């Protein structure tokens, strides 16, 4: 059974642009609901999440329109910000959690 405190789970399909503290990615929502403003952790190794890798979902675009959330099984172009964007690459899963 999945962890009940997971809000949203996104799998990176591609990284389209990246800077030191921002990244634009195409993602697929693979669990929960991901919303703008959610803070995410990333898997630094298969089946493990590094709580020290923190990124914030700052924008979600679907069909050319900015929206507030993405849910399964939809794809979206998203913007992330934070020091942890350097770990984002194809296949990485990022997870937001409730407190």
Image (cartoon, grey):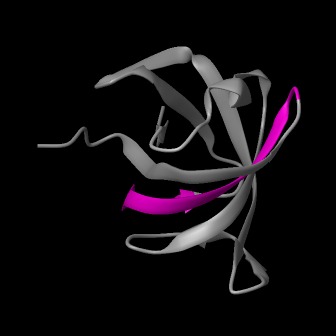
Q: Is residue 31 above or below residue 67?
A: above
Magenta: main secondary structure equals strand
Q: Is residue 35 above or below residue 39?
A: below
Left or right: 90, with 14 as reference point = left
Q: Is residue 21 covered in magenta?
A: yes
Left or right: 19, with 42 as reference point = right
Residue 45 image position (x, y, % from top left): 39, 18
Q: Quadrant of residue 70?
A: bottom right
Magenta part of the protein: which range? 20-34
Residue 50 showing in the rendered view: yes
Residue at x-position 71% and y-position 40%: 56
Residue at x-position 51% and y-position 29%: 42
Residue at x-position 88% and y-position 34%: 19
Residue 91 image position (x, y, % from top left): 45, 43
Residue 72 image position (x, y, % from top left): 39, 70
Q: Is residue 19 covered in magenta?
A: no
Q: Is residue 83 above or below residue 37?
A: above
Residue at x-position 48% and y-position 62%: 28
């Amino acid at each position: 059974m999945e962890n009940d405190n997971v809000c949203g789970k996104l799998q990176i399909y591609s990284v389209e642009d990246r800077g030191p503290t921002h990244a634009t990615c195409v993602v697929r929502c693979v669990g929960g609901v991901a919303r703008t403003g959610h803070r995410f952790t990333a898997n630094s190794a298969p089946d493990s999440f590094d709580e020290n890798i923190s990124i914030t979902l700052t924008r979600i675009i679907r069909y050319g329109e900015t929206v507030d959330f993405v849910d399964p099984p939809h794809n979206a172009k998203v913007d992330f910000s934070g020091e942890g964007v350097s770990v984002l690459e194809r296949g990485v899963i990022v997870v937001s959690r409730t407190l």
